[in-house]
Structure formats: structure tokens, C-alpha cells
Image (cartoon, rainbow, N blue to C red):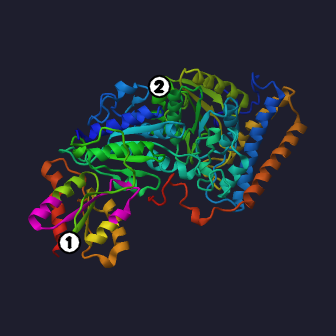
Amino acid sequence: MVDIWLSDDHELGIASLEVPVAVDFKDIETSLEAYRKLLLIRTFEETLEALFAKGKIPGFVHTYIGQEAIAVGVCTNLRTDDYVTSTHRGHGHAIAKGIDLNGLMAEVFGKVTGICKGRGGSMHVADFSKGILGANGIVAAGTVIAAGAGLSIQTREEDQVVICFFGDGGINKGTVHEAMNFCSVKKLPVVFVCENNQYAQFTSRKLTTSVSDLSVRGVAYGMSTESVDGNNLVEVVEVSKRAIDNAREGLGPTLVVADTYRFSGHYVGDPQAYRSEDEVNESRRRDPLLLFENYLESHGLADSDRFELEREIILKLVNEAVVFAEQSDYPEAHTATDYVFTDLIEGRQ
Amino acid sequence: MRSISFGQATVEATAAAMREDDTVVITGEDIGWGGNFGQFKGLLEEFGPKRVLDMPISEALILGSAVGAAVTGLRPIASLSFVEFTMGAMDEIVNQAAKFRYMFGGQVSVPMVVRASDGVLRSSGPQHSESFEAFFSHMPGLKVVAPSNPADAKGLLRSAIDDDDPVIYLENKKITFRRGPVPEEDYRTALGQASIARTGSDVSLITYSVMTQHALEAAQVLLEEHSVDAEVVDLRTLVPLDIDSVLRSVAKTRRAVVCHEAWTFGGFGAEIASQINEHLFGELAAPVLRVGAQSAPIAFSPPLERALVPEASEVVQAVLRTVKP
């Protein structure tokens, strides 16, 4: 019962709602800011699920529901000029790093006002002005890109850091090996955050991965490693802060494995034949939003009235983004080959 | 003018770019000691290990990190010794470098150069002898450069490093040691401008890279032994493609043979032949022919290798078929 999704060697009871006392979240504004980010991601993704079901969104949508505390917790420690590389499940990372919400929503709709002018869509949201080097439809592609951003920082002698978000599916890719070895040998300022959501697309981690504790993979590269309960925002903030501080100080990369659970399917509409409803329901008892609300209440920082108020504010923001996206135009057909090159049209000057 | 090798010419272009711009770095396999073809000689000594990086044999990392560096302020030159090694990093080239600008709506450009040696050289065998420019040219978002001589090698590499888009720079092994006249000063040769390597009136040989040299040899034979005056159009870059120079030449000669060392089937020559037909069909005196490799991996054994890959004699034969049907 207990070992539904946590790594086998964790002893964090699934029914327990206990959370450790925070160092960063005693301040009410800081706490509420983080809460709003969690809510914003959750509300954005749930809204997309509903819109997708109505046929309003083209393509696929991979939602981040259940994993919000990882993006929010890690990005709480970042500056605007720090970089993140993301995955096909990238809306949460982008929101946590400060992407423009209207631009994000319009991109998912394929509109010209989208952050990528409708060229990328849900799997390729990016905002380079915020250091978001792109969600990426190729699993673990961000690892080697993150290594390059780290190399760039080191060459330019800056003190930025790079967060490389990837998953338990990605950890078996060769790019992870190539990137981790290089970042370690050059002591690059890269923090690898492996979101262990238990499923590589439609296949359980347990069927595909040689170790249950994914953090041991980092040991092979001489890297620092950390494991964290990825549904516990306070813990994610603390652990990732250590890794980020080390990276910024030139002490090299860390592999942070954040255990979590993907509440929704691989994509919206996934019939989820590979797992039981009981497993999903059981995991929802450790909803990261619920855990953080519990924390805020138990520390006297907010109460249920406040949560309700925040939910209303966030829902309004998301609904406004939907209106913005719906009212925006699609890109014009004659612009379909714009942005392929900086100076060419169809391979010719 | 002094004469230097193709490899040395690329060293001069790289050094000039690195002196001018601190963000230019070179990363790749076996850079520090000077490279298999001397194409990096002296760079480590001049620019130090922070800008001249010997990378692990991790092709996806070498090209993926070039993408990451290029979108965060550097202008990397990433080198893989042999073009076959790019196959271990095709995701990074095709799905990342080529698409970043487009799929992110023009937010960024990806100013990087991928250098790789291609082509046949003395029985290098099926995994070290091939030419993949058709793959790269097919992919929207990549520029493709394939110089045929040391002077162009220098000027085109300088322009490739300046360019804000990803550029695949292919250096043919058979010509990389060959010497030729190269100006000493720093200069750029624009991407997207073919050169007329030889003027002629009877047939146009459309070519690039090592086959330009073979086409020039063929033109000499054709004139001396068959009284056929061939024009040689050296494309120099495949993307951007200077189709106007091709069409001008073929409109004049009314006959064309497209020549490359890569496989004929599905090769870049098919694109050229097709565009000639689309524009000049009624004016042609003969069908456009292609000269390229037969469809097999490039064999090790010398007679098999030679049988697969064309040189000047195959060009001569093809021309004779177009002028004397």
C-alpha cells in the first residue's frame, strides 16, 4: 500500500501529511507567492484538459498535474537570468520561471500571439527573455543543451546557473550520460532535476530502469546527488537551494531526484490502461497543493478562506488568458516559412 | 600568391574569427593536438583551453552543447572528425539546431558551425568515407557549405562563423591536404554565391566539393580529346543555393551534368536536375544527367571503392552522352 510510487528505499508514508518545518517559508508573502504559482500551474493545466476535451486545442497536451511542487520549488531559488531546459511536459516549468501567461495560452492554441507565434505549440513553449530555453518534444534532449548553457556561463565567467528538468523516462537516454559526465568533468553550473513521476510515457519505471533509487546514477559521474519528496514544496526548495548554491559557487553539478506522481495520463485523453484507478487515487492523497495548504494552515500563514480567495484570483487570470487566446488570430498562411533562417526564404537569399 | 593547404586555410579563418570575437569557441573531438588534417593546428596554443575544448567522444553532447551555448551568448564551432559521426547526434542537428529558431517563433538564432570531414580517402571503409550533404540540405533550418579549394575554404568558413544560423561545413578528405593559392589577409566569401570555376560553351558541369576538382580535370580532357568546351559551376554552398548562376550557365550551354561524390539516388544532384528542368525544359538540348556514387556503402577494398565513387573519367563519359547522343 505504502510503496505505490515512492522509490523503494524511501520511508515517507503515503498517507502522512506531515511536512518538515521550512527555512524559507515563514514569511507570509513568500509563502503565498509560492502557493499562487502552484495554483496557477494546476489551474492552467486543468483548464487545458477541459478545453482539449471540447476540441479547442490542436495537437497533444501533456499536463504537469501532480508535479507542480518541483517546478515551483526549484524556480523559487532562481534569478531571471538563470536558465532552465524543459521537457514535453513543460508548462509548469515555464510558468514557474515566469513565462507570460497569455503568450503561453495563445501558443497552446496555435495563435499568432503565442510566445512562439504558433510555430511550436504546447511541447515547445519557450521564453528566452526569462531564461526558458524551451520545452522540448525529444526526451532528455535538454540535458546536452543545458550542458552547453553551462559551458557558456563558465566561458563568459558569469554566475548564472542552469536547471535541467528531465524525467525518469529520460534518465535512460544516452544524452543523460554524455551530459552528466561532461558537466561533472568541467564543474559546470548545472543542476539536473530528475522528476521521477513513475511512468516513462505509458510504461512503469520499474519495468525499464536498473535501479530503484535513481540518484545513484549520479554517483557514477562523481556528482553530488540528492533525493527529495517532490510533492513537498518546502523540501524541494531546501534541497534544490543547496544544489543551486553549489552550482553558483563553482562547485559543479548535482543530480536531484524528486519523487512524484503524474496524476493525469501521459497526455490528455490517455486511457491509462497501464495503471489502476486505485493507484492514482491513493497517490492523490499526497497532492502537492494539499500538502502545502496543510503546511500554511499548520504554521498559521493562511486559512481555507484565504485559499478560496487565491483560487478565485488565479482562475480569473487563467480565464483571461483563455479569452486572450480565443480572441487572437491564427498566423497567416503566407507566413508559414518565416523564422526558418535569419536571412533566407526557402533556402535562397 | 603563397600556396597553403585546405586545412591550413581553415585554421587561418578560425583564428581570425577568434581574434575578432571572444565569444567564438571551438569544441570537438581531438582539437588540441591539431586534428587529423591539421585543421586546428596552433589554435590551442594561441587561444588556450577555455576557447579550444577537447571534448569527450560524446557526439550528442558536442552538438547539443553547441546548441545550448549558441543560444546563450557564444558562437561555437563544433567539430566531429568524420561526417559519419554526426549520425550519433542527428537529434541535436535535426531536431534542435535546425528547429530552434523556427519552433520558438524567431526568439533566438543558433549561430553555430558543425565541421566534419567527408568523402573517400584511401580505403577508409564504409563508416569513414561517405558524403551526407543530401540529409543536411533536406532539413529546413540548416545551411550547408562544401568548399572545393583552399581559398574558398578560408573565406567560406569565415562567413559560416559570422552567420547567425547553424551551418554544416563539410571538408572533403581528399582535398584537405591539397594546396592552393590563398590570400594572406582576412576575407570572407559570401554564402550562397556559386563560382564559375571554368568558363565554357558546350555543357555545364554543376558540382561542389571534391568533384569540382574532378570536373576541372574532366573539362581539360574533354577539350583536348573531344573538342568539347565545358563550363564548371562550383556551387560552394548548397544552402543557400545559388540556383540563378546554375540556370544562367545552363541557359547558355543547353546541356548539364550534375556531379557529386555522394550517392546519385536521392542525392543533391536530383534537386539541381529538377530545378533545371522546371526552369529550362524547352531550351535543353539533352536530358540533365547525374554523376555520383552507386548505391552501396563505400567499400574498403581499393578496386571496389573506386568502382563505387566517380572521378574525372565518369564525368567525361556522362558529358559525351549529352553532347553526342
- Disc 1 is placed on an element classified as helix
In percent of width and height, residue B100 lies at 53, 48
For the question of whether residue B152 can be seen, the reply is yes
Q: Which residues are magenta?
A: B219-246
In percent of width and height, residue B252 lies at 28, 70
Q: Chain of mark 1?
A: B
In screen coordinates, is B226 left or right of B115?
Answer: left
* Towards the viewer: A289 or A87: A87
For the question of whether residue A193 can be seen, the reply is no
Tell me the crowding category of disc 1: few under 14, some 14 to 19, or many 20 or more residues within 10 angstroms, Cα based.
Answer: some
In screen coordinates, is A322 left or right of A170?
Answer: right
| Residue situated furthest left in the rendering | B225
Which residue is painted at 42% across and 32% down in the image?
B19
- Disc 2 is placed on an element classified as helix
Which residue is painted at 25% across and 70% down in the image?
B253
Task: Identify the residue under disc 2.
Answer: A186
Residue type, mark 2 in image: Lys
In percent of width and height, residue A26 lies at 81, 24
